[in-house]
Every structure is written in structure tokens, then in C-alpha cells.
Image (tube, coloured by chain):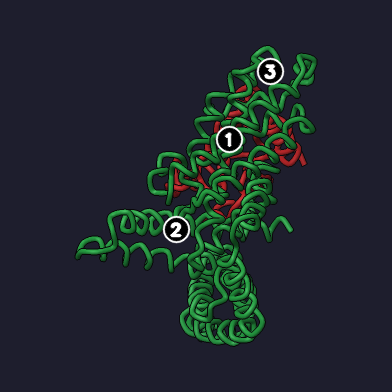
Amino acid sequence: MKIVAVTACPSGVAHTFMAKKALEDSAKELGHSIKVETQGAMGIENELTIKEINEADVAILAIDAHIAKMNRFYNIPKIEVSTKKVLKNCKKVIEKAESKVKK
Amino acid sequence: MDKFKRHLMTGVSYMIPFVVAGGILLSLGIILGEEGFFVEKLVNVGVWSLQLMVPAIAGFIAYSIADRPGLTVGFVGGVIARELGTGYIGGILIGFFAGWVVNKLKKIPIHKSFQIIKPIMIIPVLGVALTAVVMYLMAIPLTPAMTGLENWLVSLKGANLAILGFIIGAMMAFDMGGPVNKVALAFAYATLAEGIYEPMAAAWVGIMAPPIGLALATLIKPNRFSKSERANAIPAAFMGSLGISEGAIPYAVTTPFKVIPSIVIGTGIGAAISLVLGASSTIPAAIGIWALPLVNNPIRWLIGFIIGVAIIAVLVAFLRKESDIKKDQEETEFNLMG
């Protein structure tokens, strides 16, 4: 399964990047490919291209604050969670994303 | 409710850099003596930057709710909130109103060929006008309330100041970056906007004492903490010193009834002592310990802080038992430094 993800937290220095790391680790463990864009204090980094988003099966938005360029995700199945949830139990979040794809 | 929180957090996240820039430049100016051409400019720039915090939070709350068209309406609403003396609280309320009203204005039916005037004319003009009316109405009860709060805070001395410090410190420590912590921090920002700097000094203790105190506890009694908890100590203390208290959470997850009361008591007492000794801060607590020289009365602040850290470390180290290690769960496994 191909996953794209965006992480963002209010201060944009800690949770944003902790959640990115957690998503990448768990996705690897479960055998999925993933690209994670961060929208932290430095703005958008590791930006997802439209092509990457269209090719992905599902998007995971781990966000605590408003994110830019939200309209890129209109056409693909997506789940929205808090960064805290990703840090507590990332596998569960990815499994939830999987179930969204199967439907 | 979740949406509400997200909008507020967006506003706060865009506001923080204004406060950081203004707070640091202002305090540099004050330290250098407020006189002379250069220093005077420094103080001015600091104050101007700080004054943008109310418009910024209002503007970006509205941006979060209504996207791009919300920004202008929210910003102007925030300037009105500031000029009418309703401060930060007024800014937050009007930001929400501005976002809501812009979303309503977006839905006005309009003939296709005139569509273009909606974003460039209707939304900014009507949005700002309506927001201004509402802000003037809100200021009727809000301005006297804010002035009263301000006068009350300025009049606090001695024991009352200690109670204020204890409450802010305790709230900041209670959920380590959660909603209660944010309420206390919002209060410290609000008073900062009014030129009252004591609550922010208490918030400094509240952000940094829990993770550093807990890290110290793992050094005092290493056998009472699990391997991952000991490994987390240094990153938690490091992040704590940079103004991020979430590093304390893993310890509170395993043994909440031992850790949370300890950090609440230790932080509360530490913050109370700092304030009574005369510490105050123009700089937001989120910056971290390296900005300590810019706090007013840094040594006195440090005395309270060290006492707070010591109380936390000793309480936790002695309340924890070796049997607590077994409860170590998956949740503690994430390491802050990745």
C-alpha cells in the first residue's frame, strides 16, 4: 500500500517531526511505502507532489492545526487524527487507514 | 470541540514568533538601559512586534476557519480588539467571529458574471464592517473586565503573588502540554499583552521544571525506572530546557498518581518562590532556558526553579517503587529525539 501523510502541530518543532518519524517507522514495519510531508515552524518541508498524492492509496493527516494546501487531498481516501494519537499508537492509525482503502 | 481547539492552536502557532521576536528585542533594550539612539529603537521595535500579537492570533484563527478570505477580516478585528483594550481574550473571540462571518459571506448567492467581486469586494468590506460592529459591542463588557483583571494583577503582592505563581505553575505541570497547561499559558500571554510580566515567569517554571525534575529523579534512583524511561531522561531534560514539556508524559503514563501530584506540587512551589523573589519575564516561556539572561531577575527566577526541580526529583524518586517498572507499556517506548 502507498501512503502519503502530512504532520503538523501548533509549535511546529516537536510533535510534527516525532509524528513523521513514528509514521515512517510503523509503515516500514507493516510493509507499506510512505512519504511524509511536514508543515512545521519552517513551513512545508518534504512537500508531496500532486502526482504522488494521486498515486497513493490513502492519506493520513496527523494534524493539530490548520494546514496549507488541504485541497490536494480531495480525491483520495483520507483519515484525520491528532499527532498525539500517532505517537501513542501509530500502527493502529495505519490499520485504520488500511480499512479505509478496502471499503 | 476538536475543530474549535484546532482553530485556536493555529492562531497560537502563528502568533508565537511575533511574541518571541518582540519579547526578546524588548528585553534586550530594557537590559541595555532604554536610553540612546540604538537602544530606543530596539525597545520600539520590540513593542511594535509585541503589539501585533492580538491581531495575529485573531487573523490566523479566522484563517484557520475560513482560509484565505478570513485573514483580512480577522486581522482588522484583532486590531480593533487591541485598540479597544480587550486584549488577547477579545482577539481570540473576534477571530472566531471573523472566521464564522466570512464562511457565511462566502455563501451569498451572486450572479456568475459578478462572481469575482465576492472575494475582492464583498467579503473584505462586509466582513470587516460586521466584525467591527460586533467587536464594539463585545468591548462594552470586555474592556472593563480586562481593566479590572489588570489592576488586580498589578496590585498583587506577597502571599497573593505566591498563590498566583502556585496556581499557574501547578496548572502548567498538571497535564504537561495539554489543555490545562494551555489555559495557564494563554493567561500568561494575555497578561504579557497588558504589560504584566509575572505570570510568564511562573509559566517558565511550569514548562521546564517537570521534565528536568523527572530526569533528575531517574538519576537519583535509577533502579526504580525502566530502561526506556532512563534512556528518555536526557532527551526529556534537553527538550524541557528548550521549552517543550511533553518529555515528561511517558513517566506520568506509567504511574500517574505518583508523578502528577509530585510535579504539580514541586512546580507550584517553585513558581511561587520565583515570583515572590521578584522574577518576571517579557519573553514567552516556549523559548527555553538559553534565554534565561533576558528574564528580569534571572538569579531569583533560578532559585525558585531549582527548588521546584529538587522537590519534583525527590518526591518522584521516593514515591516510585521498583515494582512500578513492570507496568511499563508500549506508550513509553517512543523516544523524543527519534
Q: Which mark is residue B19?
A: 2
For label 3, count other residues whose C-alpha is less than 10 Å away and answer few (under 14), some (14-19) or many (20+).
many
- The residue positioned 49% from the left and 57% from the top of the image is B14
Q: CA distance from mark 1 to mark 2?
A: 28 Å
| Chain that bears disc 1 | B
For label 1, count other residues whose C-alpha is less than 10 Å away and answer few (under 14), some (14-19) or many (20+).
many
Q: Which circle's residue, 3 or 1, is located before the other in the chain? A: 3
The answer to whether residue B68 of the structure is visible from this angle is: no
Task: Tell me residue A48's x, y (percent).
Answer: 49, 43
- The residue positioned 53% from the left and 56% from the top of the image is B198
Q: Are marks 3 and 1 on the same chain?
A: yes
Tag 3–tag 1 contact (CB < 8 Å)? no
Residue B76's place in the image compared with B306, above or below, is below
Please name which of the two marks, 1 or 2, marks the residue nearer to the observer.
1
Q: Are marks 2 and 3 on the same chain?
A: yes
Task: Tell me residue A101's x, y (percent).
Answer: 71, 39
Q: Which mark is residue A101?
A: none
Q: Which circle's residue, 1 or 2, is located before the other in the chain? A: 2
Q: Are marks 1 and 2 on the same chain?
A: yes
Label 1 element class: helix
What is the drawing colour of chain A? red
- Most foreground residue, A29 or A33: A29
Q: Which residue is label 1 attached to? A: B307
Tag 1–tag 2 contact (CB < 8 Å)? no
Q: Quadrant of the N terminus of chain B?
A: bottom right
